[in-house]
Amino acid sequence: MKSKIQSYGYEIQIQVFSVPILTENDTEKLGISQNLIAVKKGKSSYNKGTIVICAHYDSTKDSIGANDNASGVSVVMETARLLKDVSSDYELRFIFFGSEEAGNIGSHNYIDGLSPDDKKNIKAVLNIDSIAQEGASKPYIFTMNGKKNFAIMLLKNIPKNMNVKKAGREISDYAVFYEAGIPSLCIGQAYDKNLKINGPRDTISAISGSKLKLIADIIINSLDS
């Protein structure tokens, strides 16, 4: 990921943090994880604030992680590639979080490192997580309270059948931003019996290219202005 996003011309920041790891004999030790951050500055003359586009890159130990969450990473990466030369009123931050599966540890560390002014300047968070499994539900737009917010207002060309749903639980990194009072959403598939994540069935053979393109087009079209 680092070399790929650098090849697009972005300068990157790496945030390193500790994460507890359960060993084979059920004892804990401290390991290391990282967040990867690429920033595209907004127009210097007029900056409306910051928009975060993010996905976690880790998976559970028994999973290849094709849908959860290589699908989200690929959309964020493609968005960064296509917007690298686009002038925006917003600063765009493309963030790849580590250790989401361990309890959103990466996003917690990121938020904890921000000043009150930095948090206030983030106007919206667009989080992408588990969007492209063939045979699972269509992607939804999740918010923590099921209500629309400024992050949703940014989205353009949303299909009529892509509904806003209440998450019901603190799934994925956008919940951490919500807790900090920042408008946030997560685009993902419904967590039902048909979603094959966090296990050996989460393979690339189950990925739908059309679903990847659908979400990438929505994000890119929403920010390409």
Image: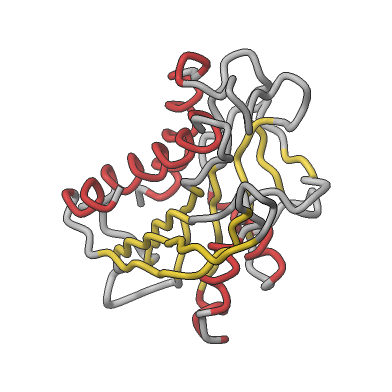
Q: Is residue 152 visible?
A: no
Residue 157 versus residue 136 in the image, above or below: below
Left or right side of 199 for 205: left
Depth order, front residue of 26/49: 26
Residue 75 versus residue 108 in the image, above or below: above
Residue at image location 46% in from the left, 46% down from the top: 57
Q: Position of residue 11 (x, y in %)?
A: 22, 64
Q: How is the image coloured?
A: secondary structure
Q: Is residue 54 visible?
A: yes
Q: Position of residue 174 (x, y in %)?
A: 62, 56
Residue at image location 43% in from the left, 61% down from the top: 35
How many numbered discs sit on the rendered protein? 0
Q: Position of residue 85 (x, y in %)?
A: 20, 52
Q: Quadrant of residue 191?
A: top right
Residue at image location 48% in from the left, 56% down from the top: 97
Residue 201 versus residue 32 in the image, above or below: above
Depth order, front residue of 52/1: 1
